[in-house]
């Protein structure tokens, strides 16, 4: 665990090009470490859109969707967009620091606390069931 923290502390940007990560805990860790995050957004990674507000709390890389199996699907990541957004954050320190601070504030606010998420899901179920 301390090895992960050491890497986070020594980083400028956190990059998570993932195909399927329903609850990306690593994004929470990056937020808590005040890192700007670049991650993929796809139907297989629905939490990314909930966690990342483009340009405010991170950067989302679109992913080409198709019906191919995951190994072939992996080739469809938008590598160029990933590179461009990462490069932008590395070259623009004020934007990187602003995004990092915003993401830290989001995680510090308790917005993503499990208790709040459970309450939100319960509310959705109550509404759906009438």
Image: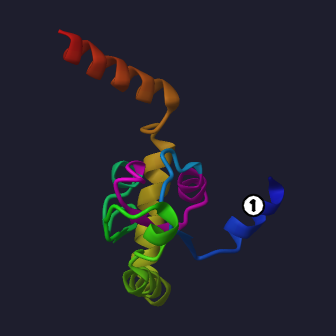
- Residue 11 visible: yes
Count of numbered labels shown in the rendering: 1
Residue with the mark numbered 1: 4
Figure coloring: rainbow
Residue closer to the observer: 75 or 9 = 75
> In the picture, which quadrant includes the C terminus?
top left
Farthest residue toward the left? 130
Residue projecting furthest to the right: 2
For residue 96, above or below residue 68 = below
Vertical relation: 54 (above or below) 104: below
Say which residue appears at 34% left-offset and 25% top-offset: 120
- Segment colored magenta: 26-47
Q: Residues within 10 Å of mark 1 (few under 14, many from 20)?
A: few
Q: Residue at x 48, y 24 (%)?
A: 115
Residue at (27, 22) in percent of width and height:
124
Task: Name the residue: 68% across, 66% down.
Answer: 8
Which residue is farthest front? 68
Residue 93, image x, y percentages: 47, 83
Q: Nearer the viewer, residue 101 or 67?
A: 67
């Amino acid at each position: 665990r301390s090895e992960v923290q050491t890497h986070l502390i020594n980083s400028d940007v956190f990059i998570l090009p993932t195909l399927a990560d329903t609850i990306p805990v690593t994004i929470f860790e990056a937020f808590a470490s005040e890192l700007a995050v670049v991650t993929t957004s796809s139907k297989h990674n629905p939490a990314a859109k909930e966690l990342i507000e483009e340009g405010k709390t991170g950067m989302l890389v679109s992913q080409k969707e198709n019906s191919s199996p995951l190994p072939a699907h992996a080739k469809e990541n938008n590598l160029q967009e990933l590179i461009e957004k990462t490069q932008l954050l590395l070259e623009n320190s004020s934007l990187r620091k602003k995004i990092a601070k915003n993401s830290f504030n989001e995680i510090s606010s308790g917005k993503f606390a499990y208790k709040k998420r459970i309450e939100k899901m319960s509310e959705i179920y109550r509404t759906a069931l009438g």
